[in-house]
Amino acid sequence: MDSVTSPRGATGDAAGWDLRPMALDDVEAAMAVGEAADAAQAEAGQLPPRPPPSDAQLEASRVGHARFVQRDGPGAWVAVSEGQVVGVAESVRRESFWGLSMLFVHPEFQSRGVGGRLLEAAVGYAAGATQRMIQSSPDPRAMRRYFLAGLAMHPTAEMGGQPDRRAIPPSLPGRDGDEGDLELVAEVEAQLGRSRPEDVAFGLRDQRFRLDVVDRGPGRGWVLWRPDRLAMLGATDDRTAAVLLWRFLAGSEGEILVHGLTAAQQWAFDVLHRARLTAQIRGSLFVDGMAVPVPWIPSGWYF
């Protein structure tokens, strides 16, 4: 994707909205925009309906959105109309990697150029980056925008449901991990061409998350997860990645979800189909300047 210089301040629009850098005071409003956009996609049949978030989930979301302002401020922007936030874009920069973590526009302001302007602003944070990535929802307008911006499109699947625990191998290599394993995470990430140790460390501040690692034998890897969802995973080889995915399934509770799987992650489909989970095609992963990392599972926010 060609770099686009982001605006240096608020920029007006004839349709009645302005663009400006996101502030901490915008967090609640940004969350509300995301909820409204998701609800509209669910109503259109593009996403499944979601249950109301718990208080713990809401607080984790607040902390996560605030981190974009605090850690990646140049990549976080909002669209504002009459003092109200009507769109939000948040992105990350890790060394030579840039990723668009989210872009939401309130349904009442969609198809008015808001999303395109937010994308331009967020892409300004990508100046000098050699690798770019976007995880897209199933919204056809979003996927069209990202593809026409010059990124290669890789349709993605998510798999979820109640795992068949009879399929889980009885003895799995690996161990529980902690912040002392962040050097291992960094070494594995270097082989994948990524850099997520600081994002793993951030995730571990939330007591709902666990880290499992494999650090003995020919392969090495790690997986960050909570009982209902795999957050992100990285490994040096498919076999080690499969072990880590099985470890997540063994520790999970109730119905679970694994998302962001492209055709490059056949090892993951093998495990999840054996566990009798259900696959749904959901959106796409867009990349530029890189191949889809393997074996790897992305975070919805931190890739």
Image: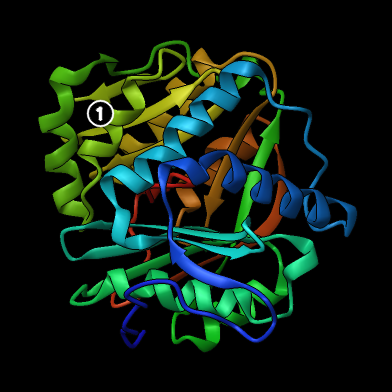
x 40%, y 19%: residue: 206
Q: Which residue is mark 1?
A: 201
The image quadrant of residue 294 is bottom left
Residue 234, percent across and down?
31, 42
Residue 84, percent across and down?
65, 55
Q: Secondary structure at mark 1?
A: helix
x 59%, y 63%: residue: 80
- For this rendering, which residue is in front, 103 or 26? 26
The image quadrant of residue 57 is top right
Q: Is residue 178 left or right of residue 146?
A: left
Residue 56, percent across and down?
57, 17
The image quadrant of residue 256 is top right
x 18%, y 42%: residue: 188
**Colouring chosen for the image of the structure:** rainbow
Structural crowding at the residue carrying mark 1, measured as other residues with C-alpha within 10 Å and reported as few (<14), some (14–19) or many (≥20): some
Residue extending furthest front?
82
Q: Is residue 139 above or below residue 271?
A: below
Q: Amino acid at mark 1?
A: Ala
